[in-house]
Image: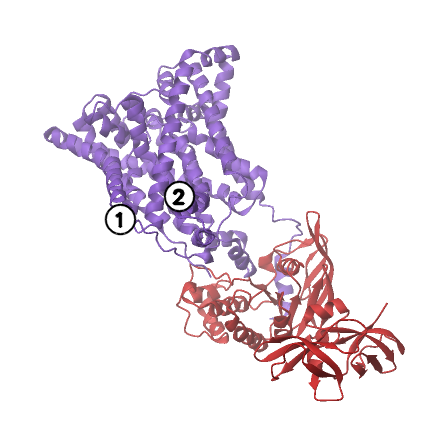
Chain colours: A red, B purple
Amino acid sequence: MRQVAVAGLYKAFGAHAVLTGVDLEVPAGSLTAILGPSGSGKTTLLRLLAGFEHADAGTIQIGDTLVDGPGVYVAPERRRIGYVPQEGSLFPHLSVEANVGFGLSARERRGGRAASMLELVGLAGLGKRYPHQLSGGQQQRVALARALAIEPAVVLLDEPFASLDAHLRASVRADVQEIFRRAGTTAVLVTHDQDEALSVADRVAALRDGKIAQYAAPEDLYRRPVDAELATFVGEANLLEGVLNGTVVKTVLGNLPMDSAATALGAAGQVTVLIRPEQIELAAEDGVAGRVTSYGYHGHDAVVRVQPDHAPDDRTIVVRIVGGHYLPVGAPVSLRAHGPVFAWPRD
Amino acid sequence: MTAGTLADRDREQAVPAFRHPRRPVAVLAVSCLVAAVLALPLVFLLIEAQGAGVSEVAHLIFRPLTGTLLWNTVRLTVAVTVACAVIGTAAAWCVERTDLPGRRAWAVLVVVPLAIPDFVVSFGWNSLWTWAHGFRGAVIVMTLAVYPLVYLPVAASLRSADPGQEEVARSLGSGRLRTFARITLGQAKGAILGGCLLVALVLLAEYGAFEIVGYQTFTTEIFTEFNGYSFAASCALSLVLVLLSLLILAGEGMLRGRGLISRSGPLTQRISPPQRLGRARWPVLILFAALVLLALGVPVGSAVYWMVDGLPPALSGGANVSLLNAAGHTALYGGAAGALATVMAFPVALLAIRHSGRMRHFLERSTYLVLGMPGVVIAFALSYFTEKYAAGFGYGTWVLLVACYAIMFFPLALVGVKASLARAPVSLDEVARSLGQRRLAVLLRVTVRLAGPGLVAAFCLVFLSAVTELTATLLLIPTGTQTLATQFWAYESNLSYSQAAPFALVMIIVAAVPSYVLGRFFNRPVQAQG
């Protein structure tokens, strides 16, 4: 069942069109990430969902209710959306408990709902503190508890982890994912960080040029993006020329099996092949010979760029290796790719 | 949570179909109303001028007296504004950015003179030294009385400015002085200009202090002419004065330029390490001591001197009762005016802070015009309109006086309310609305609560000014009643210095409380926000 349905959404600020026909259906209980580069309109989309802005055209439905559309506009306070802005925006004059209970009726507040929400986000016992006495991660979790307390139809999060330190981000992300799993609430978060989108969300909507380019599970989006441009946006990609023949594609890295989902290609022809850096390994022998052109060390892994010896052009191949040793520039290596790979017709 | 309950809720409330309700119609309407009320004095002047006839008004304007008044007013305004800018900025920089010993104590002491009415400062100097007279006396007295109007905003802006900019400038090879001139002054430019604007407008409207030192400006002449019921002449002079205020407003707007209204985020608060004064420490300390002695010591000392001088008659039973009585009235009128002006300023400030746009900007700035308008014009305008259109409602009662105060000091309330609303970011309102709160509830539960301290500051600013207001009070005060200011004035005019002195002291005490609150408000570090 879908919880949020957006159709043909259009929004312009003055002459600048930000959203040019967004269609999106968010399933109930899912955690959807809207992924886009800065300026792609993802925050605008979120603010339209929340009701802080008005759509110029198109409709938004939350649950079964039309909240924005021709002649219809439901005010934010009547949409039952839990909104978590980028900086958390706790009310500085209220205690943590009062923050969480802000949207509740007096009866609900007496019922101890705020305390149980704090427990849900793992901050039991901190109710009497004030926002400035909390760490950034704690503030973010209070903001989440406050949004969840009103039993929202959907929780909207605007770059919720951007203001956190890098070392906090991973743990807070995991916490948030766990909190949503337990609460069973539908959530939509926007982010420009593809790593974050892929790791947190059940489904990722890639926003490009004011439209949703693709809405899919993280693995689908990563392995089977709709086009080459999206492929490079969601991660590092080797885009190679290839010749398709049945279920096998011939590339500079040899013959590789095709992904069975790539059905739009027909039986044979010229294609662009997507090979992710981690699909390639540096083999001892009988691979494709080449020389290292750069070596980037990241601790947990390393990114090596290799120029194959017999290549049609001077494009390098990006390889991600785990636990390898340092390779100087010019060192001879041997590449071996693993399928299945994804491809698009080449024109 | 299910979609069902959401639908139920909406069915219950029968959602009306609105598009674009974000345009702040109600706020805009109330603001326009406030602006209309503030425009009453100007309308009054135009009506009177029209009644007198254009040629008559032109004749009254183009006479030698106007030239003298213009020269007097302009040279005084320029001299005092420049002096205040230098003293206020230098003092603020020393207190906020250097290792001056006793910074916290100085921060309070240099603001206290704001609590001393201008005409009491004037009385203090003039009653002790005869040379404090005319232009020289007016410059000394007014500079010492109003420089805190520059100090306060500049200190606040220096405190919230990003010290990183200075550090970057230093790292790029710019020396101490160059950094101060190019970065620090640049950061404080808006605050300095804002303070100077207030100073200049206050000078245009000042009456009591100039009357005591015997210096003739537009406002003193207007008061004299109004009192002699030569309405046409005083209206003509008032129109010139309004023109002068407009020029000052436009000049400030031009100097301010564009894009300077940037606010630094509350999260970027970092205390810069104080600059070392080194060998300059002692001279600076002596200058501070001198400033406080002149601005605070002279007026308070002279009031005490005259009171002790005439001790037996001043403390007789009758005098005490009238003192208490006058203090009570003063507090009542000032309090009511403070509340009224703050309430009026709220929608206009909301518009100015939360929404941009030419019309709104104009609306906000136009309200400054009343600051340069002499109290006596506003008082006459109010009684004229109530007599003509409200069957004399409130005439001769304190209601009219309080309304007059609220109009006169509206710009001060606006400054305070705006500063406080800047502390309540819009994102908090949005969160509150997403949590199911209606606009009004959001206003009361979030915006007003966060703006609370600033609203108190706005109230105090107006209270302070109303307590020390003289001309409108003299005209509109209910018959048989006295405030501290009017009673002081009555005694001072009779040269009964020792009888006037206790009223001056009580006035200072009554005004000291709100000034203390103000100092606290502007000194408070911006609270870290969620």
**Left or right position of A170 against A318:** left
- Element marked by disc 2: helix
Q: Residue at x 43, y 47 (%)?
A: B179
**Left or right position of B364 against A68:** left
Residue B217: name its quadrant: top left
- In which chain is the residue bearing label 2? B
Q: Nearer the viewer, residue A239 or B130?
A: A239
- In the depicted structure, whether residue B245 falls above or below residue A336: above
**Residue A154 placement (x, y as % from top left):** 61, 67
**Residue B110 placement (x, y as % from top left):** 29, 42
Q: Kindly identify which numbered label has been placed on residue B264.
A: none
Q: Nearer the viewer, residue A303 or B79?
A: A303
**Residue B326 placement (x, y as % from top left):** 25, 33
Q: Amino acid at mark 1?
A: Ala
- In the depicted structure, whether residue A249 falls above or below residue B258: below
**How many numbered discs sit on the rendered protein?**
2
Q: Residue at x 10, y 30 (%)?
A: B312
- In which chain is the residue bearing label 1? B
Q: Which residue is mark 2?
A: B154
Q: Nearer the viewer, residue A59 or B318?
A: A59
Q: Which residue is mark 1?
A: B105
- Element marked by disc 1: helix
Residue furthest toward the front? Answer: A330
Same subunit, labels 1 and 2: the answer reads yes
- In the depicted structure, whether residue A288 falls above or below residue B121: below
First along the sequence among labels 1 and 2: 1
Q: Amino acid at mark 2?
A: Val
